[in-house]
Each structure stands twice: as C-alpha cells, then as structure tokens.
Amino acid sequence: MVKKQLIMERAFELFAKNGIEATSVQQITEVCGISKGAFYLSYKSKDELVYALIDYFLSDMAANIEQAVSESNSDHSLLYHFYFNIFSSYQSHSNFAKVLITEQFTSCSMELFEQLSKYDQFMNSIIFSIVDRQFPNVDDSMRPDLVYTIKSFSKLYAELFISNYPFELDTVCKSLVEKVTILANQADIPLISAEYLTYTSSKSIIPTKGELVDLLTAKKDEISDQTIQQSLELLKDDLLNPQYPGVIIQGLLKNLKANSHTKWTAYLYETYLETLQ
C-alpha cells in the first residue's frame, strides 16, 4: 500500500476512535509501521493530514450525490437520493463525523477554505438543479428559499446519524422530502436571495487542464491499486495528447468511480470534458 493512502486510512481510524487532538503523529506512525520521517514526507503536519481527510470525506459524499442525481430516472426521487447519500456518509463514518463537529482545530489553511468553498458551491448548484427538476412549478422568487431549506435540513438532521439513537435512514429521508414538498407547494414569502447563497454554476468547480493533470498525478502517487494507477496515467496521457476514443475514456472513468479515493476525480474530469464539447 502506498504510504499516503496507508496514513490516511489508519489516521481515519485513530481519529474516529480517540479524537483528533488526542491522537499524536507518533501514534499514527506506529500503527502504520513507518517512521516519522516517512510521515512528514507525505504530510507537513497533522493539520494537513486532517485537511486531507476532510477533503476525502466531502469529495466522496459529493461524488455519490452527483452520481445519484445524474443517474436518477425519476425527477420525483431526486431529493430523496440527495438526502439518502448525505446521511449514508454520516452514518457510515459517524465517529469521524462526530469528531469533526465537536472538536475545534488550532489552524485553518487558505487551501482548505477554498476547497470547502468549492464543495459549498457544488452543493448549491446540485440543489438548484434538484429544485428545478423536482419542483418545476415553484416561483423563481422562492427557489433560493427552497434551496436554503434543503441545505439547512441536510446539516441539521445529519446530527441524528452521529447520535446513539437508532434512526431509520429511509424514514428520515422520506420525512424531509415531505416537509420540503409542503414548503414548495405552500410557501410564498421570499426571504433568501440567490446572491446570499453565492450561487454559481458548476463551472466554478471545473479545473483547468493543468490543475487536472496535477490532480491525476497526485492521485496516482496516493493509490496502491494498479488498475486505478494505470487508469489515472492513461487519462493524464489523453489530456496531454488526445488519442483514445470516447468509449475508452468512459471505461477508465468507470474504474475511477469504483474507488472511493478517485470518484470525485472522475467527476472533475467529466466536467472538464463537457467544457470541450
């Protein structure tokens, strides 16, 4: 296993079990079976590792949401799939999510802030698309309010899945869809503006060719799976020198989508390709 991937996976387990502040670099290196020097070759500090884990957590959630919404055959089930994927992520990683919510970090990098802003923009964009498809009769003036409500519910009700109470995921999702539907049909006093949500189109998260090449290179160094490594390398080669037919590219992207560490990379690659069409 590549050191960076190993460090992330073992640290994820330790942070979830003991908390971030209580986990030292020494403990991480011991469970990984590596030296501190090897750790600092991958991450400059524990904070940088935490940021990488947050990025992984959010990118995995975002990729799952995008896939569920884009592949849905029914506009009426879009919001359900949106909530289901968000809460499934919290449910699967409840201990780590609890740590993120309850602990305060000593520092925050501008890079992390910008990355979080991109995920926030993506979330606004995907929710606007859900509102347009599932609630096409909502007045334009009420669209931002509905988006704000959907987004707020996703944050507020996420706490259910990091508590010890056994909530039923399907019931929670259906209940929230019902509540949002009532608002979509009945509410008529606008409050939130699109500007407040800093809504932009999905173009805000489309990487440049150079950024995408750098991302593919970095992911190849992190991943131990040879199939994924080869897929990343071939996709990078095609970016620099287009040579493969579309069916090959889609097959390579399918490989990336099957790996939790590269699903978001596949989505960014696809959004970049869309700009070329």
Image: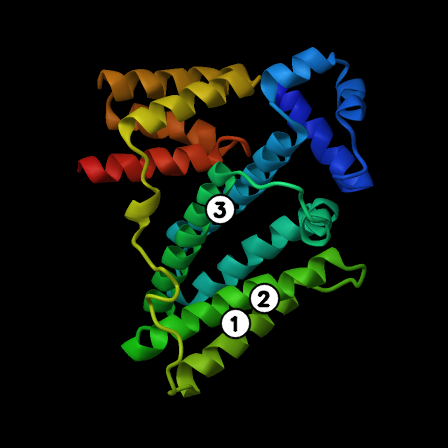
What percent of the width, then of the height, locates residue 145?
A: 41, 75
Viewer-side residue, 83 vs 21: 21
Q: Are marks 1 and 2 in contact (CB under 8 Å)?
A: yes
Task: Specify the quadrant that holds the N terminus.
Answer: top right
**Which residue position is annotated with label 1?**
177
In whole angstroms, how far apart are the C-alphas of marks 1 and 2? Answer: 6 Å
Q: Amino acid at mark 1?
A: Val
Q: Is residue 175 above or below residue 119?
A: below
What percent of the width, then of the height, locates residue 45?
A: 64, 26
Q: Residue at x 53, y 67 (%)?
A: 152
Q: Earlier in the sequence, mark 3 or mark 1?
A: 3
Q: Is residue 64 above or below residue 277?
A: below
**Which residue position is annotated with label 3?**
116
What percent of the width, then of the height, locates residue 63?
A: 47, 43
Task: Specify the quadrant that holds the C terminus.
Answer: top left
Crowding at label 1, few (<14), some or many (≥20) Cα neighbours within 10 Å?
many
**Which residue position is annotated with label 2?**
173
- Give the SS element for disc 3: helix
